[in-house]
């Protein structure tokens, strides 16, 4: 199984922009890996933000978007808000099997 | 309103078996893929298994051969049968589809 890597931690200023990335040990992440992004806050179930690289759900804030960037999946958060402080996980599928990244702890400070 | 409710968790000895259920309302389990994800205490998310619309299934290496995912279309329930349980299977188990998650059920493997 692939090893999926994310930045362990990132800090963004309120109102600022931050990009979280998701890479794979097997090579470039593409749309064929159907990248997902999730947000998890302490004591809560994860929440799906992005599916299939770029697709948002109705509850996904407009300031959050997904893309592919430099061979990785990317989650861009523009205009960070205090409520964006959370752990963000990516998930990619490789030959049908899903693999999560280790998560990025995002601090808004 | 979409709801996913996991049941079946509990305390069980190593080597035992457990069947988790995910009761779904608001959509049909056969209309989208359904997946199980687990989270060990204080750890990150770990993908466990998936069942697709066409019934095809996939498993993480850590559970392959021990866990079986299935769905009951008549009752709109997703199941996860877990055999030969190990201490390292201890986790909160979540069911999810493309967008929605349940609140999870805790499985504790301990003697």
Image (cartoon, coloured by chain):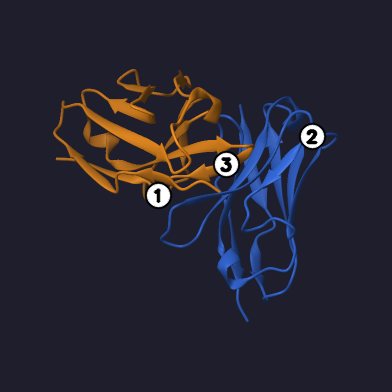
Q: Residues within 10 Å of mark 1 (few under 14, many from 20)?
A: many
Per the model, the C-alpha gap separating discs 3 and 2 is 16 Å
Q: Which residue is mark 2?
A: B55
> In the rendered picture, chain A carries what hue?
orange
Nearest the viewer among B31 and B11 is: B31
Q: Is residue B50 above or below residue B42?
A: above
Q: Residue at x 62, y 35 (%)?
A: B3
Q: Residue at x 27, y 35 (%)?
A: A83
x and y percentages locating residue B18 in the rendered image: 73, 63
x and y percentages locating residue B35 in the rendered image: 64, 41
Q: Say which of marks 3 and 2 sits in front.
A: 3
Task: Specify whether disc 3 shares its chain with disc 1.
Answer: yes
Q: Residues within 10 Å of mark 2 (few under 14, many from 20)?
A: few
Provide the letter of the chain coloured blue.
B
The disc at residue A98 is 3
Nearest the viewer among A93 and A38 is: A93
Q: Residue at x 43, y 58 (%)?
A: B43
Residue A61 in which image quadrant: top left
Per the model, the C-alpha gap separating discs 3 and 1 is 13 Å
The disc at residue B85 is none
Per the model, the C-alpha gap separating discs 1 and 2 is 29 Å
Q: Which residue is mark 1?
A: A102
Residue B62 as seen in the image, left or right of residue A45:
right
* Quadrant of the drawing holding the C terminus of chain B: bottom right
């Amino acid at each position: 199984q692939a090893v999926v890597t994310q930045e362990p931690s990132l800090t963004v200023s309120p109102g600022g922009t931050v990009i979280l990335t998701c890479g794979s040990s097997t090579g470039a992440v593409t749309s064929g890996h159907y990248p997902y992004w999730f947000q998890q806050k302490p004591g809560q179930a994860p929440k799906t933000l992005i599916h299939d690289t770029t697709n948002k759900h109705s509850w996904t804030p407009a300031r959050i978007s997904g893309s592919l960037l430099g061979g990785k999946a990317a989650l861009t958060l523009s205009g960070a808000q205090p409520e964006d402080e959370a752990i963000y996980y990516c998930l990619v599928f490789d030959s049908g099997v899903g693999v999560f990244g280790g998560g990025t702890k995002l601090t808004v400070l | 309103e979409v709801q996913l409710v996991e049941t079946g968790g509990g305390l069980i000895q190593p080597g035992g078996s457990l069947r988790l259920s995910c009761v779904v309302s608001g959509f049909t389990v056969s209309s989208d893929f359904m997946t199980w994800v687990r989270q060990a205490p204080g750890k990150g998310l770990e993908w466990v298994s998936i069942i697709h619309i066409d019934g095809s299934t996939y498993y993480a290496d850590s559970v392959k051969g021990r866990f079986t995912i299935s769905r009951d279309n008549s009752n709109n329930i997703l199941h996860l049968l877990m055999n030969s349980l190990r201490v390292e299977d201890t986790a909160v188990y979540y069911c999810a589809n493309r967008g929605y998650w349940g609140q999870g059920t805790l499985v504790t493997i301990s003697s």
